Image (cartoon, rainbow, N blue to C red):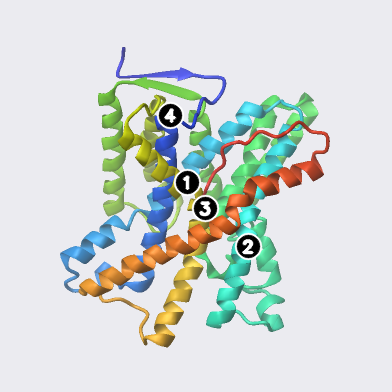
């Protein structure tokens, strides 16, 4: 058998007891933790380039918390695999698109709407938001228009990111990819030329309306959707090689690449980084087996991935709250990169971010399926009991 052989499959074969699911859960959870750790470090520590002698410990911290850009690419890739792959499984079935729309809306809004109200509470406490009309009625970070615009995925396109929560930019990408993908599918699978032409026109209109870089990065999302249909047969050595390549190119572009934003110039590097990851995922189509260690890793990865979406959208407001408390109660909002005590404070803060994210998950995100069942009961009467698709955590 060749080291790597690629096979097309009509249905996604992802199962809970596979190494594929284990790796996917672990990647989602660690990616979200990486983003939170990177933003926390950037907010409460000075940049490495601002220091004359940063010290080895701080340089190591800065390096290992510097993969937030690559982490977001992992979100796009896995989102395409799970969300796109799920729709590919169901396209053509009765009410598939209406069910898909409810799935996507409930997935986003069950987390975003409560998070935005938490952000308003934090903003009122810190003074960033006010109850005056200028705070909620007029244009601004906390306005009603900005709230609604962010719920609809219009941040960075029409409105600002709500409450200055800068990671929300990627949720605009996700929202539009959720819309563009079914339009793309219906061009080929729609009922009749009229429907196909209408979907082609709507897709072209979305490409014309959205920022170029947002459309460009739809390619990363589509890569994940495509590989949900590809099984890669491989041996252990080939999988280890793919893992080494994925880690190697990520480290290379962490040091030498464009990591501050998604740009047309950064698309090539991000495609190079995601290709070995998606091939590795497709090659991990084996059962976890009886290994106690792997089962424990799988349990941890699943736990971390369950609240990764909430952690992603909530951590910046909590950082703002921590900084406000530090400024008002302790007279400081930055940590000393040369202090071992401040290193301990940093990791304590990171634990607070995880704890608040998990608590919010228990209150809201964990109830996504209940909200979804209720919505389908109201909007899809007499429909068959919906299945429980694998859903994406952001992103």
Mark 1 or mark 4, which is nearer the start of the sequence?
A: 4
Mark 2 — residue? Answer: 114
Residue 346 percent location from the top left of the image: 32, 69
Q: CA distance from mark 4 to mark 1?
A: 20 Å
Tell how many labels: 4
Q: Secondary structure at mark 2?
A: helix
Dividing the picture into quarters, in which one does residue 19 lie?
top left
- Label 2, label 1: how many angstroms apart (C-alpha)? 22 Å
Name which of mark 2 and mark 4 comes first in the sequence: 4
Q: Please report whichever mark, 3 or 1, sits nearer to the chain's N-terminal start.
A: 1
Q: CA distance from mark 3 to mark 1?
A: 10 Å
Q: The N terminus appears in which quarter of the rendering? A: top left
The residue singled out by tag 4 in the image is 18
Mark 1 = which residue? 75
Residue 222 in sight in this render: no
Label pair 2/3, CB-CB below 8 angstroms: no
Q: Residue 246: horizontal and vertical position, in percent?
A: 31, 39
């Amino acid at each position: 058998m060749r080291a790597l052989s690629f096979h097309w499959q009509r249905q996604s074969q992802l199962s809970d007891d596979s190494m594929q699911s284990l790796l996917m859960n672990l990647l989602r959870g660690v990616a979200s933790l990486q983003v939170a750790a990177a933003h926390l470090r950037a907010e409460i520590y000075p940049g490495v380039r601002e220091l004359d002698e940063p010290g080895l410990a701080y340089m190591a911290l800065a390096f290992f918390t510097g993969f937030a850009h690559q982490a977001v690419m992992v979100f796009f890739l896995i989102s395409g695999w799970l969300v796109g792959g799920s729709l590919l499984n169901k396209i053509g079935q009765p009410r598939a698109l209406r069910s898909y729309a409810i799935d996507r809306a409930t997935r986003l809004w069950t987390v975003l709407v409560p998070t935005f109200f938490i952000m308003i509470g934090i903003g009122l406490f810190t003074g960033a938001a006010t109850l005056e009309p200028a705070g909620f009625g007029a244009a601004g970070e906390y306005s009603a228009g900005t709230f609604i615009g962010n719920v609809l995925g219009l941040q960075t396109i029409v409105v600002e990111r709500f409450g200055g929560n800068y990671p929300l930019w990627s949720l605009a990408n996700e929202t539009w990819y959720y819309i563009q993908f079914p339009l793309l599918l219906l061009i080929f699978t729609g009922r009749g030329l009229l429907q196909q032409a209408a979907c082609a026109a709507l897709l072209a209109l979305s490409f014309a309306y959205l920022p170029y870089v947002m459309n460009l990065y739809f390619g990363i999302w589509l890569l994940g959707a495509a590989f949900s249909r590809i099984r890669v047969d491989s041996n252990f050595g080939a999988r280890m090689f793919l893992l080494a390549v994925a880690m190697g190119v990520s480290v290379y572009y962490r040091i030498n690449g464009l990591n501050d934003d998604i740009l047309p110039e950064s698309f090539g590097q991000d495609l190079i980084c995601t290709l070995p990851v998606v091939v590795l995922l497709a090659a991990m189509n084996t059962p976890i087996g009886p290994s106690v260690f792997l089962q424990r890793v799988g349990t941890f990865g699943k736990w971390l991935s369950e609240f990764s979406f909430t952690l992603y959208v909530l951590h910046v407001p909590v950082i703002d709250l921590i900084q406000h408390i530090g400024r008002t109660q302790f007279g400081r909002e930055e940590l000393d990169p040369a202090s071992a005590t401040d290193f301990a404070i940093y990791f304590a803060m990171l634990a607070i971010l995880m704890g608040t994210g998990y608590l919010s998950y228990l209150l809201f995100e964990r109830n996504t399926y209940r909200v979804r069942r209720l919505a389908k009961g109201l909007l899809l009467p007499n429909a068959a009991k919906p299945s429980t698709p694998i859903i994406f955590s952001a992103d």
